[in-house]
Image: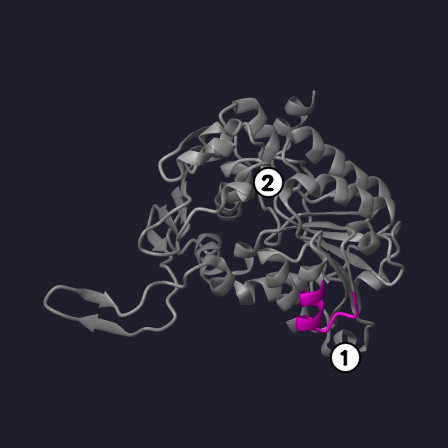
């Protein structure tokens, strides 16, 4: 039943922002199953519901948990300055948690009040660095803190679903790093919990806030390259993550390709109707003993959209030439493509080399920091 219902519900103009759950209405996010090679599971996972509305950056404190939050997508400078700050707690002080703490501190009207990490010394260090008053080793202390309006979940993927449900049970709005969960059943449970509690759930997909990808989307919307024929994206990291990171993380489709699959949907402006996905291991042979797509460090996807539009995605855990993330859209009247982002525009010309003097930004932490700040402002 779920499969048939979700397959029927296609939305022609999805929100330009990551999707949320607000007051009984699901704003879908592409939470990808770790069984991407299975067609049915993949399609159900990428289409989480059919009701799509623009996420409203209304101050969290002004929204009753059981009242509508549908308001225009604008706010006057006076209103923005007058509202109470949104007080947030952050679960997880690893790499991505630190990125979000930096973005939270830079976003106007957002204040971190408590952080947690199982290794409490990491939480203490993060609290000192970012001026957070409280720190703990227990995530539930963040979730139950009466001062907290919203919780940032930056823990490992396998803990996301339970922590989302705990936030919902305690009436806390939720910003969660991708994915929602590591399998489809837990994804649905987490979504339903927020739906029933009337709290916001937003999944971190910061590329939607990057000016390069936004410019490609605008070109599509304004028909600068005509009608879309093919969309291509690639993501290749400088080096593979450690074994401990991959284990239990839900696999390369949930953990890495989810950004690219979401971007194809963001650019096409529709829901997929068919997916073919394959994976293999070329870089880190130590992960080959892990289950499902956790054993893959390289993967490719072909996604078919309505009106014959096809999207192609390739991802790899290692790129010898640096962080490689690009998008390309071929249309009936032309093509638009993004390039990698470099720390400067300097080029060097020699008898054995001509090109950029330096490598692209080495990882998402440096390339997308401003997108993380914009994403934080949109949520709050």
Could you tell me residue 345's position as x and y percent?
A: 32, 73
Q: Residues within 10 Å of mark 2 (few under 14, many from 20)?
A: many
- Residue in the image at 75% along x and 70% along y: 132
72 left or right of 232 in image? right
Residue linked to disc 2: 30
**1 or 2: mark nearer the eye:** 2
What secondary structure is the magenta-colored segment mainly?
A: helix
Q: Quadrant of residue 124?
A: bottom right
Image quarter where the N terminus lies is top right
Tell whether position 168 is magenta.
no
Q: Is residue 349 above or below residue 210?
A: below
**Residue 24 visible at all:** no
Residue, disc 1: 78
Quadrant in the picture for residue 93: bottom right
Secondary structure found at label 2? loop
CA separation in Å, label 1 and label 2: 35 Å
């Amino acid at each position: 039943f779920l499969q048939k219902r979700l397959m029927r519900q296609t939305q022609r103009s999805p929100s330009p922002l990551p999707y949320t759950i607000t007051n009984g209405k699901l704003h879908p996010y592409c939470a990808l199953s770790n069984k991407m090679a299975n067609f049915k599971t993949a399609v159900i996972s990428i289409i989480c519901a059919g009701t799509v509305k623009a996420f409203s950056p209304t101050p969290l404190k002004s929204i009753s948990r059981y009242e509508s939050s549908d308001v225009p997508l604008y706010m006057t400078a006076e209103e923005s300055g007058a509202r109470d700050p949104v007080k947030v707690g952050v679960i997880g002080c690893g790499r991505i948690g630190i990125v979000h703490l930096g973005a939270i501190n830079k976003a106007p009207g957002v204040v971190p009040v408590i952080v947690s990490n199982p290794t409490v010394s990491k939480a203490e260090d993060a609290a000192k660095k970012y001026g957070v008053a409280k720190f703990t080793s227990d995530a539930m202390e963040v979730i139950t803190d009466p001062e907290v309006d919203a919780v940032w979940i930056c823990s490992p993927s396998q803990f996301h679903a339970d922590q989302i449900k705990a936030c919902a049970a305690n009436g806390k709005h939720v910003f969660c790093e991708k994915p929602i969960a590591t399998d489809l059943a837990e994804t649905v449970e987490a979504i339903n919990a927020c739906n029933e509690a009337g709290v916001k759930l937003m999944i971190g997909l910061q590329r939607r806030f990057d000016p390069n990808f936004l410019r490609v989307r605008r070109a599509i919307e304004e028909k600068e390259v005509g009608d879309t024929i093919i969309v291509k994206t690639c993501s290749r990291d400088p080096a593979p993550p450690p074994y401990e990171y991959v284990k239990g993380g839900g696999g390369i489709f949930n953990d890495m390709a989810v950004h690219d699959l979401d971007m194809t949907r963001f650019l096409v402006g529709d829901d997929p109707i068919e997916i073919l996905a394959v994976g293999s291991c070329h870089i880190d042979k130590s992960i080959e003993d892990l289950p499902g797509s956790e054993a893959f460090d390289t993967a490719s996807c072909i996604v078919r959209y309505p009106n014959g539009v096809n999207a192609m995605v390739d991802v790899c855990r290692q790129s010898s030439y640096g962080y490689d993330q690009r998008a390309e859209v071929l249309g009936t009247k032309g093509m638009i493509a993004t390039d990698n982002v470099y720390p400067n525009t300097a080029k060097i010309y020699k008898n054995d080399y001509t090109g950029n003097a330096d490598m692209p930004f080495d990882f998402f932490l440096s390339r997308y920091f401003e997108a993380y700040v914009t994403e934080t402002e949109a949520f709050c």
